[in-house]
Image (cartoon, rainbow, N blue to C red):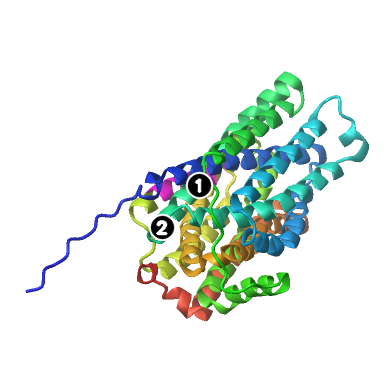
Amino acid sequence: MNKISPKIKHDPFAALRIKEFKFFMSTRFFLTIAIQMQSVILQWQIYSITKDEFSLGMIGLAEAIPFIIVSLFSGHVADTVSRKKIILISTLFLIISTIVLLYFSLKTSTVIQNYGTLPIYIVVGSIGIIRGFFSAAFASFMSQLVPRELYANSATWNSTVWHLASSIGPGITGFIIAISLSLENDLSLAYKINILLIILSLLSLLFIASKPLPKKEKEESLKESLATGIKFVFKNQIILGALSLDLFAVLFGGAVAMLPAFADKILHVGSVEFGFLRAAPAIGAVIMAIIIAYKPPTHNAGRNLFFAIGAFGIATILFSISTNYYLSLFFLFLTGAFDNVSVVIRHTILQLSTPNEMRGRVSAVNSIFIGSSNEIGAFESGVAARAMGLKPSVFFGGVMTVLIVAATVKIAPKLRKLNLKSIE
């Protein structure tokens, strides 16, 4: 008689039991708070100067163009240079860029008075270059800190920490902006706290040892290296389908970029309430992440992915027609909760399907699809808001997201039938 093997108990905290992964999550936490905080400050600052939705969209475009330009090259660099070193250098440059933004915000500075918002957009462009290198190295470095069997668990905690920090960042920034304006009549205090958080992330990273780069099967020129990463993604129907679905959902479903205008023109609230609006999607994502940690969405992952992105689109539609502040908070909360399901599934697909020696390049392609789509989506939202009006533009984006999900269900059967349990 065959013995029935005992069922292995799922450990939702498995990745967090690895010391270096915990320090990595600490780096992720402080840096994400800083980046989200910086985004809120910039949105508030630009909108305060211009009172124009299109100018909010331009923040995204100013960051996306340089990000896309450097991303493929940064992926090659992440596969040939120490990934920890790339993260360290990128973080140092981020500190310098934020110091420049701090200078622009001072009452004694005449830069904005003389040149308008252009200098801010130029610094945002430099941050796009920094993010291009940082993104490729960060995801690749994380995969070197945990064993393969914990990829799904590490992706869950990575997403959880990111969304937790993304809820704290905007939430506290609304208060910090209000305090900064009342005490100093400028945003210098907000930028100083922003710089401190980036420094804390840098200090946490120092507790993680550098990891040797995976050996390549053959030496490649820069052109061959870039082409190999692109071909790998475009020949893998499941990876390409997941990235494309997320790309268009983020591109059309991004209501967050227009929140300063919604707070001002639709909901008639101030900086503190605006901070909570910005935090609401991340709070939803954190709560969903806790559920996912105990019940991963890897079984019937394809079905779960389609359902989550479709529900994200519906929640965006409901947000666009709401005129009640608390209902708007709730619908934004739902967008974050459903988005986090797709984030965890996509990250798990990438980690399980990508060879170690190609992680930098594949992460770079992923960043072009997903990272830049947030910024380009912000630009699309700004253009649509100017063309259609504020509320119709967000409604249109939600409808387009639902239609794209419906179309992808039909044209991507492999993705629809995906079960990640079978490839872990």
**Residue 210 or 340: which is nearer the viewer?**
210
Kindly report the secondary structure that dominates the magenta region of the rendered protein: helix
Using the image as rendered, state which of residue 173 and residue 161 is in the foreground: 161
Question: Is residue 372 shown above or below 88?
Answer: below
Is disc 2 surrounded by few (<14), some (14 to 19) or many (20+) residues within 10 Å?
A: few
Q: Work out whether residue 15 or residue 215 is closer to the camera in this orientation and state it.
A: 215
Residue 370 in picture, x, y percent from top left? 61, 60
Horizontal arrangement in the rendering, residue 380 relative to residue 235 (left or right): right
- Amino acid carrying label 1: it is Phe
Any mark on residue 333, and which?
1
Q: Which residues are magenta?
A: 279-290
For this orientation, the residue located farthest to the top is 183
Name the residue located 67 percent from the left edge and 42 percent from the top edge. Answer: 39
Give the residue at x 68% y 45%: 89
Secondary element type, mark 1:
helix
Q: Is residue 134 left or right of residue 206?
A: right
Q: Nearer the viewer, residue 332 or 65?
A: 65
Q: Position of residue 399 (x, y in %)?
A: 59, 64
Query: Which residue in the protein does label 2 denote?
Result: 147
What is the C-alpha distance between the residues marked 1 and 2? 33 Å
- Residue 36: which quarter of the image? top right
First in residue order: circle 1 vs circle 2:
2
Q: Amino acid at mark 2?
A: Pro
Let me know if residue 340 is in the magenta part.
no
- Does 284 appear in magenta? yes
For the N terminus, give its image quadrant.
Answer: bottom left
Residue 206: image quadrant is: top right
Q: Is residue 44 visible?
A: no
Residue 178 in the image: x percent, y percent?
67, 27
Badge 1 crowding class, 10 Å Cα cut-off, few under 14, some 14 to 19, many 20 or more, is many
